Image (cartoon, rainbow, N blue to C red):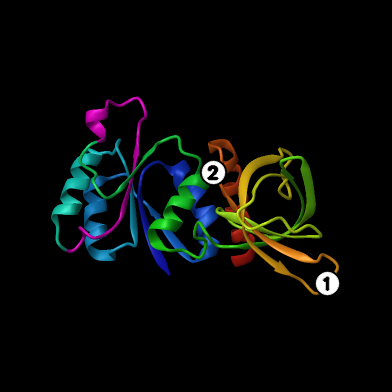
Amino acid sequence: MLTLLLVEDPQVYLDLQKRLGPRGVKVINIASGTVALEMIRNLKPALVILGYDLQDLPGKEVYRRLKKNPQSRSIPVIILCDPARGQDDLTGFEGDEVLSKDVSPDVLVQKISEKINMPLRRHDRIAIDMGVRAAQEKASITGFARNISASGVFIETNDAPKIGSDLTLSFTLPGQQKPLVVPGKVVRCIELQREFRFGLGIQFSGLPPGSREQLLDFLIHKSLQVTA
């Protein structure tokens, strides 16, 4: 079991415990910077999430001592900062992640996943059965998505656009109401031996920030259902 040390407030702890517990991650919450440093030495957690407002030591001082110690300096850290703080207060964290304190729990879980290599990584594919429409210049393509990741989607269709073709995809993720409209490029086309004759690998060409969060939210929750 991986251990994650959270030096922050109880609500963040409850959110992470709910999402990470089923994936074999033990979350420990501490409010004291001094106690946290002692536990880091003893437990050697896979990752530390560090807030600014602690009971005894400033978060920046806890970070400095953690990185000064040869036994703990290699532990990745995510710093949760107050967005109202000045830019000077956000320096000195080279190589580690600095996030706004009001980051959504799902985005925080995604960042943790990337840091400690949990089962869901940003390019993992999730099986899906979802209708998709794609606009290509004046033509329209319809099909069904069979898997999706943060970087692209695989759809089955009766149409076969050329590899390299630019498309605009439109689909609604299961369980969500807001449709996504994202640009994509055909990077793979294979012939299938079934009703839908072609399989298209489509790489997203750049998700708008709101659409990216919506997709990551879906992928994380779907991954939790699979691994629970």
Q: Residue at x 76, y 65 (%)?
A: 198
Residue 131, disc: none
Q: Quadrant of residue 156?
A: bottom right
Mark 1: amino acid: Arg
The front one of 137 and 90 is 137
The front one of 101 and 219 is 219
Q: Earlier in the sequence, mark 1 or mark 2?
A: 1
Q: Is residue 91 above or below residue 148?
A: above
Residue 155: image location, x then y, percent = 72, 59
Question: Which region of the structure is painted magenta?
Answer: 71-90
Q: Residue at x 42, y 63 (%)?
A: 117
Q: Residue at x 29, y 37 (%)?
A: 52
Q: Secondary structure at mark 1?
A: loop
- Name the residue beneath numbered marker 1: 194
Q: Is residue 117 shown to the viewer in this render?
A: yes
Residue 193: image location, x then y, percent = 80, 74
Quadrant in the picture for the C terminus: bottom right
Magenta stretch holds residue 81: yes
